[in-house]
Image: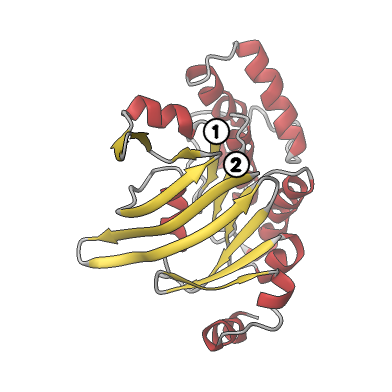
Amino acid sequence: MTMVAAEGVRKRFGSLEVLKGIDLEVRHGQVLCLLGPSGSGKSTFLRCVNHLEKIDAGRLSVGGELVGYVRRGDRLHELREKDIARRRRDIGMVFQRFNLFPHMTALQNIVEAPIRVRGEARACAVRHARELLERVGLAGREDSYPAQLSGGQQQRVAIARALAMRPKLMLFDEPTSALDPELVGEVLDVMRDLAAEGMTMIVVTHEIGFAREVADVAVFMDDGVVVESGDPRTVLTDPCHERTRAFLSKVL
């Protein structure tokens, strides 16, 4: 089953074309890692997947449904915001910055969306949140505020918050880039566990070792296009394109 399908996806900001015809497929249960230099369009593509950015051309679907649009006859019509939000509930996203509510405890941050958006009973949401905190290695920190947590702990709370919506797809936008080096491993360990459990994931990352170990597909992007994609062991060890080799020579 195809979870994410991108066909000729284009996106521009004013006169700058950031995505120049992206073709990608992510199948159910796969982990796809997007690699490439800053400004290559990786994060923009990720934001298009859950319609935080609107594409200008092409087609993008998640779970067989167009992202942000519905087809009526031979025309596409943008969905109403509440319908976009309803579809977005099935896509979890973890950003570079943790974006936790500073005035809420870890537990409160996690239960907010399931209660308000999904209408879950508070007792059910709290029970699930406690299970998720244990899953990400933070059992006992339910009453801690973000300022009382390390960066790695905050990012793990952010992952638990995304998982609380029971998504079918997880998007990670350089989730370790804002962390001190010694805290990177604890976040990557949680992501490894998610991958082992079969969660479908698209990960924008510069962690080449993680991509080599966990990804089913590695994609190298540059200047808004897919330069190379395939088995991580091939793309990261014996790439076909000189641009990929030049990039890897600087980050390995």
User: Quick check: 101 left or right of 35?
Assistant: left
Q: Residue at x 47, y 31 (%)?
A: 87
Residue 250's place in the image compared with 64, above or below, is below
Residue drawn at point x = 43 percent, y = 41 percent: 67
Q: What residue type is disc 2 on?
A: Leu
Amino acid carrying label 1: it is Asp
The answer to which image quadrant residue 83 occupies is top left
Q: Name the secondary structure under disc 1.
A: loop
Give residue 3's mark.
none
SS at mark 2 in the image? strand
Task: Out of 61 and 97, give the one closest to the viewer.
Answer: 61
**Where is mark 1, residue-wise?**
90
Q: In the rendered view, does 92 fall on the left or right side of 11?
A: right
Q: Is residue 156 visible?
A: yes
Q: Is residue 175 visible?
A: no
Q: Residue shown at 52%/42% (left/top)? A: 62
| Residue at the farthest left position | 15
Q: Are marks 2 and 1 in contact (CB under 8 Å)?
A: yes
Q: Position of residue 181 (x, y in %)?
A: 65, 65
Indicate the position of residue 126 as horizontal and vertical percent values: 66, 19
Q: Nearer the viewer, residue 16 or 240?
A: 240
Q: Is residue 143 above or below residue 127?
A: below
In which image quadrant can residue 8 be found?
Answer: bottom left
Q: Quadrant of the N terminus?
A: top right
* Residue named by callout 2: 169
Residue at point 70% right, 55% down?
188
For marks 2 and 1, the one nearer the N-term is 1
> Distance between the Cα atoms at labels 2 and 1?
7 Å
Q: Position of residue 34 (x, y in %)?
A: 56, 63
